[in-house]
Amino acid sequence: MISTETREPAIRVQAITKSFKDLHVLRGVDFDVAAGSIFALLGSNGAGKTTLVRILSTLLKANTGTATVHGFDVSSAPGEVRRSISLTGQFAAIDDMLTGRENLVLVAKLRHMKNPGTIADDMLARFSLTDAGNRRAATYSGGMRRRLDIAMSLIGDPPIIFLDEPTTGLDPQARIEVWQTVKELAKGGTTVLLTTQYLDEAEQLADRIAILHNGRIIQNGTLAELKQLLPSAKIEYVEKQPTLEEVFLALVGDDAASAGEESR
Ligand SMILES: Nc1ncnc2c1ncn2[C@@H]1O[C@H](COP(=O)(O)OP(=O)(O)O)[C@@H](O)[C@H]1O
Ligand SMILES: [Mg+2]
């Protein structure tokens, strides 16, 4: 415990703001992500999750504030940050005409790795895609595609991975497959920052959950801590713990669904 507390956080976000013209998307965002943990950034559609991930992965510049990733400042050391991370977006970077294995080999070659074929085979095994490795990616199910996409982004073994809505658009079975993958990544020591609008996803995966709402982190804690924000409903003989959904709705109110519009 003490060692994780005293270790430098893998990601540190301090007072980040970002506006697009007069749309103030991020209004001062702060949080730390402990190395080796899974951190879920939870927010409604349009809350600014992707904007923040793009800032942390150096694709976008913040207006004010600072952020470090793997100890490197995103604005003064973007190259080092990029070498420390992988980013998987909502839309896969897969070439459908190639097989799963060929996609992996291609990425390994682009990253100048030695033995791209061996790396591809290792990744196929790690993501349970060996049997499908020589099939065109176009034939893959949603869950297989997302797993292949994550595998491609992990070539080079970055210590930190950003998963922007990794299961949006997937069927329930595929979501469970991706969850399993994410859990295994974290078990192997990778720090995972994932964004999601699904409360059950945060509940399933995250060591800590931060709720992004109206441009700020309005709550940040473990699932147990978030659940304590609401008194547990007492029914005769039975104590019912509030669900994360109840906590979320109580915190953000009825405007959760229209959060994106509101800040325009
Ligand atoms: N490049 C951009 N130019 C103008 N507005 C943008 C741009 N990127 C995002 N936005 C707006 O910022 C808000 C937050 O977007 P986003 O970060 O994608 O939210 P989320 O990922 O939480 O759904 C939205 O209202 C979106 O329309
Ligand atoms: Mg998004």
Image (spheres, rainbow, N blue to C red):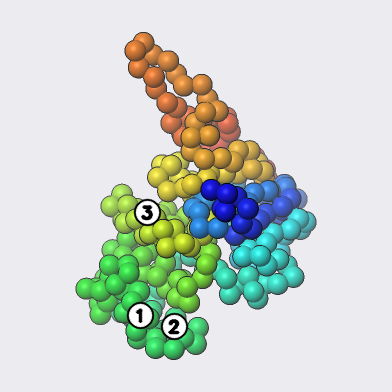
Badge 1 crowding class, 10 Å Cα cut-off, few under 14, some 14 to 19, many 20 or more, is many
Image point (52%, 28%), residue name? 228
Q: Earlier in the sequence, mark 3 or mark 1?
A: 1
Q: Which residue is mark 3?
A: 179
Image point (76%, 55%), residue name? 65
Q: Earlier in the sequence, mark 2 or mark 1?
A: 2
Q: Secondary structure at mark 2?
A: helix
* Image-quadrant location for residue 131: bottom left
Q: Earlier in the sequence, mark 3 or mark 2?
A: 2
Image point (31%, 79%), residue name? 121
Image point (53%, 34%), residue name? 225
Q: Horizontal placement of 183 versus 212: left or right?
A: left
Q: CA distance from mark 3 to mark 1?
A: 22 Å
Q: Which residue is mark 1?
A: 120
68 vs 94: above or below: above
36 vs 119: above or below: above
User: Which label belongs to residue 108?
Assistant: 2
Q: Residue furthest top?
A: 236
